Amino acid sequence: MATSAAPESAARQIGTLLQGEAAALRRGLPRTPGGEPWPPGGGARAAHDVASAGSNPQVLISETDAAPALATAPPTSEASTHSVPSDTDATALRRGLPRTPGGEPWPPGGILARVGDPAAAPTANEGAISLPGRQEPQAPLQETGAEQADAPAAPARAAVAVSAAPDGPRPPLPFTQTVWPGRAASHRPAPPAEPKRYGPFTKAQWAGAIIVGGAGLLFAAGMAVVFVRWFLSLEFMQDFLVTYPGEYHLPEGAPVGIPAWLGWQHFFNVFLMVLIIRTGLTIRTEKRPAVFWTPKRNKKGKVSLTIWFHQSLDLLWIVNGFVFVALLFVTGQWMRIVPTSWEVFPNALSAALQYVSLDWPTENGWVNYNSLQQLAYFSTVFIAAPLAIVTGYRMSGLWPKKNAKLSAAYPIEWARKVHFPVMLYFVVFIFIHVALVLATGALRNLNHMYAAQGSVDGVAYADNWTGFWMFVASLAVIAAAWIAARPLVLAPIARLFGTVSGR
């Protein structure tokens, strides 16, 4: 093992060899991307800089640094080449990680370096400059034997290790620490924000779907018109149209005309139905209600204000429906919308084909509806409306939830699966109904429904605008109610029947 005097002795010998000489340093990779190779170009350190290291952190001078200085040193005798150096001529090399996976630490043990002895220098690429800043255990140098003695003297190579005192202060690094960011630190642009979706599509996708779908529907409708007109031109279909013109005669005693109460019931029904559809859609999309309503007699029956308004409209609609049906049977108006003959089905098919062919069936709603209208009105009043009432009652707070047997016999999941499609049916019915009213004689039909004016003559009242302006006024009332259906307006009304709160 080397004694404590070995670092100072080695430093003094290096100073003597390097005094007045400039040794070219082996330059490696730059410390910063795009910078100069490290160490900087120029002469080697002055000897006094190396000697001044003393007991500071060890400095391992590379073979390329020491070669020029050692080449000018006087040759030594052969005996000295094979002799084992004293403790003052050798120090322990710092051994690091292996050069190959699973190999021995580098540099290998047993390498002996002597200052001024080129024959005893280690093999090529074994020298390096050990940067200060870490102190690690040193492995003693050992003589490599005759192979080291027989090594060629040119180019001369040497490596000298200068150990630092274990208890000395750690000086600052002789260079500014830099960190190569590597590929992981390269700037990557942030991905664009995901566009907001409305259901499965964005706004642009919905617009494209509407355009493409609309074009497809127009093309399909045009082809349907062409096909149906050709189909109705066939001889057997001409006979079919003569036999079933689209309507059949009502029973004797059936009333003629539409009374005023029926027109008002029609308006109330439309008014309530529009608001019910609006609140129903709001309930399906409302995630965090802002206002709640609690009944006075049941503090646990707390619901959102939207649900309260929806159920209140349902109750008014049910009351209006019962009054409407009662007046239908009292006045005999039921015969206008309830089928009284099996001929309703072939006549309904005939009316449908005439509508598709754009050759409207001859009709006069003041006297009789065609069979397709009759089936549509019957299905709406006596099938769709009761389904909406029964399923809505199951989902409301009026349902006896404590009755386990009744709840098991009529699960709420069934009611939810039926209630929404029924609402969609009403939407489609209203759209088609309004479209046909406007397309088959708007002024005449609006006079029938809103002004209770008509005649057995189908051409009469075709230029009367009374019903039209009443229709416009009804639309204004419905639009105002649609806008006013918000918590600011509904809360004072809801407080008359319960407690309104923000939580």
Image: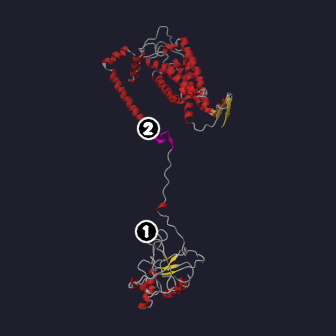
Where does residue 307 sit, x and y in percent of width and height? 60, 31
| Residue 322, image quadrant | top right
Residue where numbered disc 1 is placed: 102
Where does residue 333 sit, x and y in percent of width and height? 52, 13
Can I make out residue 475 in this image?
Answer: no
In this view, the mark in front (2 or 1): 1
Q: Nearer the viewer, residue 267 or 469?
A: 267
Q: Amino acid at mark 1?
A: Gly
Q: Amino acid at mark 2?
A: Ala
Who comes first in sequence, dot 2 or dot 1?
Answer: 1
Q: Residues within 10 Å of mark 2 (few under 14, many from 20)?
A: few
Image point (54%, 72%), residue name: 176
Question: Which residues, given as a range, are shown in magenta?
Answer: 196-205
Disc 2 and disc 1 in contact, CB within 8 angstroms = no
Residue where numbered disc 2 is placed: 209
With respect to residue 79, does 329 lie above or below? Answer: above
Measured in 3D between alpha carbons, the distance from the residue under mark 2 to the one under mark 1, in whole angstroms, is: 64 Å
| Residue 347, image quadrant | top left
Provide the secondary structure element on which disc 2 rests: helix
Q: Nearer the viewer, residue 428 or 104?
A: 104
Q: Residues within 10 Å of mark 1 (few under 14, many from 20)?
A: few
Q: Is 274 left, or right, of 77 in this rendering?
A: right
Q: Is residue 252 magenta?
A: no
Image point (40%, 85%), residue name: 149
Q: Nearer the viewer, residue 228 or 418?
A: 418
Provide the secondary structure element on which disc 1 rests: loop
Can I make out residue 217 in this image?
Answer: yes
